[in-house]
Amino acid sequence: MASTPSIIIAAPQTPDSQVLANHIRDKFNAAIRMTAVSAELRGYLDVDCPDILIVDISAKLPEQGIEMVRELRRSHPAIIILPLIPASRRELVKQLLSLDVFLYLYTPIEPAETTIAITRALEHLKSQPKNSTSPQPREDVNFHGMIGSCRTMLRLFDLITRVAEDDDSTVLIRGESGTGKEMVAKAIHAQSSRSGKNFVPVNCAAIPDDLLESELFGYTKGAFTGASSNKIGRIQYADGGTLFLDEIGDMKPTLQAKLLRVLQEKEFEPVGGLKPIPVDTRVLAATHCDLEQLVSEGRFREDLYYRLSVVPLNIPALKDRREDIPLLIDSFVHGITGKRNREPFTFSEAALLALMNFEWRGNVRELENLVQHMSILFGGRQVEFDDLPDKFHHLRELVASIMAEPSTDLAPTGKPAESSEENLAQATNSIENIPWHEGQVDFRELINSFETELIVHAMKLTDGNKKEAARLLNLKRTTLLEKIKKKSLNSLWGE
């Protein structure tokens, strides 16, 4: 790759595309060329072969856009292709992943996400030998063992990188059980200047209260019965490095006070000790609890809470980043088949849809356990919907409904979407018709009625296509289906 990266943006000429071009040019000192999404694009790439092609596939029907990416991958394998897709069409991500396209941007475009994606693409190009025709930068979805390419995960990766640079500030990592809080802590440590020293994890919930103090702070000889010699605690063992306190919300108040001193004074006293010991340890803490609630209940020190949460990091639950599930499954399958010498296996479309619509209360850990289970039973073949455990079978009707619906970009009626001004005018007229007399306005009933009207109107515009109706309403498809069922609206479309 040349010192000045070459980037082509194939997109309609709009103010947004110009802002995108200016941002990339200013941020990366890149040579930018802009062109339309047309049949001549491939020939244009032959003449002016760029490092990166940013292409707006929403300018075409979904099937045409995906097919265009497939053809470009085949004809120009050395070019990193970065598609632009509407945030409302996240189902396209699965098809892009099947083409080994692991970098993409949602529209409307956010500058921070653009910076992350272009940075990773350029890093990949730098690592490739000259004239390499390597596939798209698959490793860019793996950030220190964490897999993800959705917006929330890209933001998290970026924040981890920035937090790591300040290697003295405390960090509070929040997330449900199984989301990977320790992996985040390890990533912060690995990218910091402390990476050459120890990373010391402690699960506060797994160690009994009467042992946790001596485990953290150590003890001196004779401090208690059985203390026949001095013992170094985890805090001192992490001197110069990082101490990770998992499930900090389970720590008893007396220990919270001692930990606060470590954070404030950079010193501690071992159990039975009389002289403070200086220590240079960065503390990262994690919890799945609502610490604010614990503070209000008097079960967690308010001063320690504020000291810990200098930089808060929130890890999304798996159900909030469903588009990453195919990536995670692919990573787990490769890991299992490689390390355990098992035959590779895949998931059918129906099985994958079920996994992507499951609630995953155990998050990534639960998904990984399922993939391991499937590898034992079905290695060497495709896993079908009926092969999944019983807890997935309640999704059968939903999966069948999704698979039965065609994916179209235009409503069959061809009726253009109403403008925001028209929607506002209609809403204003509806409000003016409300009987604003005392005691005659039922707020909840009005909201429920208006929601029903919106759903019915969206379904009419899309000729009963629930996928497209959900897109118009900016709802998840599953959310729309639940509302239709709850309101008993299925009969309106002959169901």
Image (cartoon, rainbow, N blue to C red):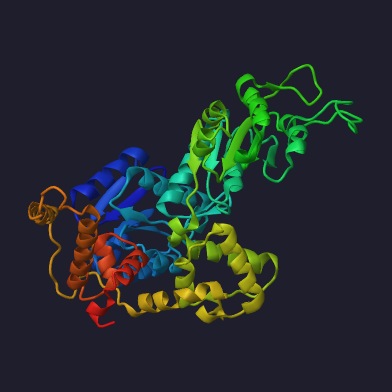
Instruction: Point out the image quarter for the C terminus.
Output: bottom left
Percent coordinates x, y for residue 379 in the rendering: 63, 77
Q: Residue at x 60, y 47 (%)?
A: 183
Residue positioned most to the top: 275
Query: Front-most of 283 and 97?
Result: 283
Left/right placement of residue 487 relative to residue 356 reads: left
Left/right placement of residue 188 relative to residue 16 reads: right
Percent coordinates x, y for residue 295 in the rendering: 53, 33
Q: Quadrant of residue 89?
A: bottom left
Is residue 448 placed above or below 352 in the rendered structure? Answer: above
Query: Front-most of 373 and 115?
Result: 373
Q: Quadrant of residue 454?
A: bottom left
Left/right placement of residue 175 relative to residue 209 reads: left
Is residue 485 placed above or below 6 in the rendered structure? Answer: below
Residue positioned most to the bottom: 494
Residue positioned most to the front: 439
Percent coordinates x, y for residue 126 in the rendering: 49, 48
Q: Quadrant of residue 88?
A: bottom left
Residue 43 appears anywhere in the view: no
Q: Residue at x 55, y 52 (%)?
A: 179
Q: Residue at x 20, y 60 (%)?
A: 450
Residue 100 appears anywhere in the view: yes
Query: Front-most of 207 and 325?
Result: 207
Percent coordinates x, y for residue 206 in the rendering: 70, 46
Number of callouts in the render?
A: 0
